[in-house]
Each structure stands twice: as C-alpha cells, then as structure tokens.
Image (cartoon, grey):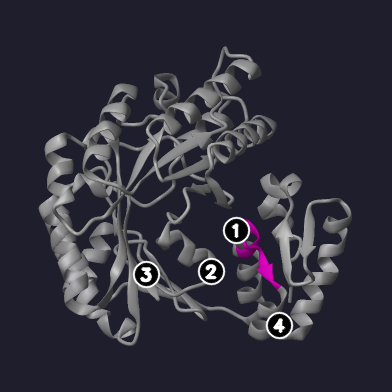
Amino acid sequence: MSGIYIHIPFCKQACSYCDFHFSTKMTSKDQMIEALCMELKMRKDSFAQDQINSIYFGGGTPSVLSPIEIERLIEAVFSHYSITAVAEITLEANPDDLSETYIKALSKTKVNRISLGIQSFHQSDLSFMNRAHNASQSKEALHWVKQYFDNYSIDLIYGVPMLGMSPEEQDLLWAENVKMALGFNPNHISAYALTMEPKTVLEHQIKSGKLPPLDESRAQAQFTTLRRLLTNAAYEHYEFSNFSRQGFYAVNNSGYWEGKSYMGIGPSAHSYDGKSRSWNAASNPIYIRAIFEGKRPFDIEYLSVSERYNEYIMTGLRASKGVELSKINALFGPEYESYAIREAQEKIAEGLLEIVNDTVLKITDSGLFFSDGIAAQLFYID
C-alpha cells in the first residue's frame, strides 16, 4: 500500500513558528490546481503497480480551496491511480475557513477525515502564534465538523511560553486545552511541542531578545500531562506525537513511520520509494512553470544502507510498536542488528530503552520525551 500527499501552498497569514512552504498571495491558485492535476497525471506510472490507501491534503492550508476544487484534485487521483475501497482521504483545515455550508459541501466529496488545526483553545496562545482564527472559531468549527464527519483529528501545540504567567499557571492552561479537546470526543489527537525553526518569525523574536528561549522542561511537563490525560481517556499513544481511539490510527502518518512509499505532489512536496527521496522545488512560480512545460522540478538523493537504517531507527523508536530486531537483520544485514543492540546497552542501563521478548527494541515511558535524541545515539555513522 502507498500514499499520495498533495501540498496546497497557500495560507491567509504566516504563523510565527511555521517553516513549511506557502504563499499568502493566492492569485495563482487556479494555475496551481491545474499544475497539481498535471503532475498527478505525469507521475501515474510511478505507482502503476501499487494500490493507494491514503490521500492527504496538507500545506499550507488546504481548506482555502473550495470543496469543488478539492473534489477536482481527488478525481484526478482516482483517474490515474488504483485506490482501495477503504482509502483514508484527509483534509487539513483551519477553523476560520469552516462554516456549516463549507463542511456540509465537503462531506459530499470523497474526503472522509478532517485534521483540524486548533493548536489551542486559548486566545492568548493563538495571538502568540499569530494564528488566523480565534478561540470561538475553534469551538464553532468543531461543532460543525462533528455534525458531518465521524472521523476527525485535533492538532494541538504545547510548550507555548506565556509571558507574565508562572510555570504552574502555564501548565494549568495547557491541561485545560487537553480537557477541552477531549470534550469534543475526537477519534484522534496530534500534539506537537513548539520548536524554534530557522528563518521563522519565532526564531527572530527569540534571537532579538523579544522573547525568552523556549523552555524544554516546561514542554516536557506538558507532554507528561498530555499523555496522562489522554491515556486515562482510553486513547492509544501509538506514536510520539499522536493519540488515537482504537481503530483510528492516521493511515497517512503511519505509512511514514512504517517506511512505506509515498508520492508528494506540489511545490516542496517530498516523495519516498524505499531507496531514494526526492522533493519538488519550493517555489510556486518555478513549480507551475515547469509543470506547464511538461517537466517536474525536483531534486533527488539516493539513500545508502546506513541512511535507510538510521531512518528506520528514528521512525521506529517514535512509534509504540518499536523496532523489530529481525527486520533490521532482514533489511540491512546482521551487522546492523548487532550494532543496534550494542549501541542500545547504555540507554537500556539508564532505563530509557528496553528489549521486549528479545525481539523488539522500544523506548520506555521514561525515555519517551527524548525519543529523537535516543534514536540519534543508535545511528550508524559511515
């Protein structure tokens, strides 16, 4: 099974923390939709032997498109690829784009899952992040999504510094966020720590002294609160940033963590076939011009065995399933399995890693917040 990711490179305004490719100018929207349809047709032979079980609209902000425009892109996928009957078709959406009319129309398309970028139910957080929506729009959007979709996910961000608040007050505000999300009974919740990415407004604010550095200990405390509240509410913590009711794992994201192939359509979108990774030009004009000329503007890198092993370790240790030692052996060779076991011993002694039933290498509860750092220590460096 494979997946298709479609990048919609438009936003109403720039969030302070975001480093994804987008433009706030939508004058080229019609041309972009045409180019996306053309790229889908252009690359149809890439997945000729595969069945697609996930179509994911990300961005940017896909909900700036109308339901008619979204359905046109979906039909382009169905025209050129083999789609499973139970394929998950997800649309990322921002609350300020959603009305009952919009959601009702969207429910009549093939979209069957909504990922709603709430980030916070508190206006102070939203203002800090320069989000386009306000707190009341978050609740109203969820009210309408619940009426028309059975499968929807809520995105939240933790570790947001609130000036003038004590650490205890910040943690209470975060706990309220999680409880409000639970009140809408979503089948899935994704939560991400606020990070300072290069060339973002947030980076400039911190480096110029307008804001203090992000507090990792605060983020860790809020991650612990998040996990406690959601697991107590019967959500499975199936990947570091993701929690799900039984049977509602995100198909698109699960494919990434399991190393499955996927195709990225649109400017800046990445693709992966198990041995190489490619990415389209991160420029709307360059992308549109090249596609209209019958070319795909992309770069590619071919991954060495060591690089593929490192990716498997990174994605595997983030997931609750962990890393299968026999799979390391089968995919990369016995020397890599031995290397992983040997390098893991220090973290096992510290109680941050464990080998379950002599077959699976997993992060312990104590090591969860440090998953990426622990995984990096098991990387094979040529």
Whichever of labels 4 and 2 marks the residue nearer the N terminus, that label is 2
Q: Is residue 268 left or right of residue 238?
A: left
Secondary structure type for disc 2: loop
The three-letter code of the residue at mark 2 reads Glu
Name which of mark 4 and mark 3 comes first in the sequence.
Answer: 3
Query: Which badge, 1 or 3, comes first in the chain's sequence?
Result: 3
Q: Earlier in the sequence, mark 2 or mark 1?
A: 2
SS at mark 3 in the image: strand
Residue 164 is one of the magenta-drawn residues: no
Look at 85% across and 70% down and name the residue there: 342
The residue at which mark 4 appears reads as 329
Relative image position of residue 218 (x, y in whole percent): 65, 29
Residue 154 position in % (x across, y down): 40, 40
Structural crowding at the residue carrying mark 3, measured as other residues with C-alpha within 10 Å and reported as few (<14), some (14–19) or many (≥20)? many
Q: Which residues are magenta?
A: 316-324
Q: Report how far apart the C-alphas of labels 4 and 3 lie in the structure.
A: 26 Å
Taking 2 as reference, is 123 above or below it? above
Residue that numbered label 2 is attached to: 258
Nearest to N terminus: mark 2 or mark 3 = 3
Q: Which mark is residue 3?
A: 3
Q: Nearer the viewer, residue 246 or 111?
A: 246
Pick the quarter of the image with the C terminus: bottom right
